[in-house]
Image: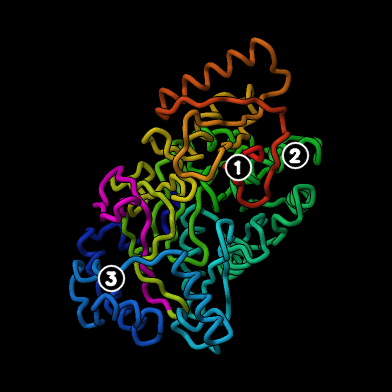
Amino acid sequence: MLKKGLNTGDCWVEKLKTSSREEINEIQLEKIKKQVSYNYKNSIFYQRKLDAAGIEPGDIKTWDDFHHVPFMDKDEHRAAQEESTAQFGHPFGMLACAPLDKIVRLSFTSGTSGTPTIYTLTKNDIKVTNMLNARKYRFIGLQPGHIVINGFGLSMFAGGVPVVDALWDYGVCVVPVGAEARSRRLLESAQLIKADALFCTPSFAEYLAEQAGDVLGKPIRELGLNFLVCGGEPGAGVPEFKKKMEEAYGTRLFDINGAVQPLHCISCDSDRYYGMHFLSEDYCYLELIDPETGRPLELTEGVTGEQVFTWLDWEGTPFLRYRLGDILQIHTDPCHCGGPGMRIKVIGRTDDMLIVKGVNVYPSAIKDLLVKYMPRVTGAFRIVLDRPGPKVEPPLKIKIERGEGLEGSALDKLKHEIEEDMSSVNRVRPEIFFVSPYSLERKENKTQYIELDPNN
């Protein structure tokens, strides 16, 4: 276990070990009162939003008071950016709480489902995010003297320059290769410099493992990496995928969350996956809600719901009750590693969720199931829809890459097994279509598992 990593030297992480949930919430409530007042005073958007709800900063005295603050989501975020551009000539005027001369970094979302949303950070915000990232690095035992290759996309991606900056600030040696350099450059760089750690998306980690034989003439485990740190999409928290990658790389796979946002989590090195330890509750208040009704859910062992979070002690763009669209599962029982805090597992996203005859289906659940059938399948797949979701008319069509040399009756048998397994485990009977090995596009950044049938 991570005995060295657990001794973080961070007073808050140490406090998590001994504080009750009531004590933590009391600290958070005091910070929330200050944050609401700050937002109301400095943001046109929040002053208008709170006024419309009949809320003044002084009204926030209890948790019940705060839970009357309306939610915010990405659509509202984008609308505020558009209004700002029309009124001020730039997209920050409505939302940003800090003046432009205090904003020193912009971070964008990927924009895969619309116009990118922008986060503004001051020097203080960057100092905080670097500190929160450092908590995660210490937790897994990453230390100054280690050499880290950052394989996240560097171009405007939250896991790019902000993570490089946080690693530098922490004191490790960083090689910012980036996903843009493609697999050959990254693999050859890792071999040349004897890298200790690789940071990238789960999809890219899988792709690099597939390419290592052709590029290096040897399996990727012979690079001798000691840390594989993955985030940006579900996958690292899928037990079967975790097992596959750890066998391929010969090291532990750590699931990570948080770069420019205050929800910072990382998994421990247990053989089983118990979720990511939530290490930033002093800068982030987390809620879960029913994604359909918006009803709040109690944070108890095993509860699943949509993430809502509030930024604490933030200057640039501190959001109140923001619905990011992630579906999380919370674990509150003590972790086997002895590490502090509640734990979080990312199940999927609300915009990835499909509903088949009343059953919710996430791509991560399909990925988890398919890994069990390797090497008869490669693990790559796409969900093919006749029309945009979330509601899908049965059957759920899934395109799957077959393994090398698999054909005829063996393929028919595999098709039956997968369909029966999904019917039993996921409560949805799919219609399976096999395609040739490695015929589906591999992505260096986030993989889109859902595609529309071009014939419809």
Report the span colored magenta.
Answer: 289-314
The residue tagged 1 is 451
Residue 397 in the image: x percent, y percent? 55, 31
**Residue type, numbered disc 1:** Glu
The residue tagged 2 is 211
The residue tagged 3 is 69
**Residue type, numbered disc 3:** Val
Q: Secondary structure at mark 3?
A: loop
Q: Nearer the viewer, mark 2 or mark 1?
A: 1
How far apart, in angstroms, are the residues tagged by discs 1 and 3? 36 Å
Picture quarter with the N terminus: top left
Q: Going 37% across and 52% down the picture, which residue do you hit?
A: 306
Picture quarter with the C terminus: top right
Specify the label residue 331 is tagged with: none
Q: Of label 2 and label 3, which has the lower sequence position?
A: 3
How far apart, in angstroms, are the residues tagged by discs 2 and 3? 49 Å
Residue 299 painted magenta: yes
How far apart, in angstroms, are the residues tagged by discs 2 and 1? 25 Å
**Residue type, numbered disc 2:** Gln
Residue 50 in the image: x percent, y percent? 30, 78
Q: Going 62% across and 26% down the picture, which residue do you hit?
A: 433
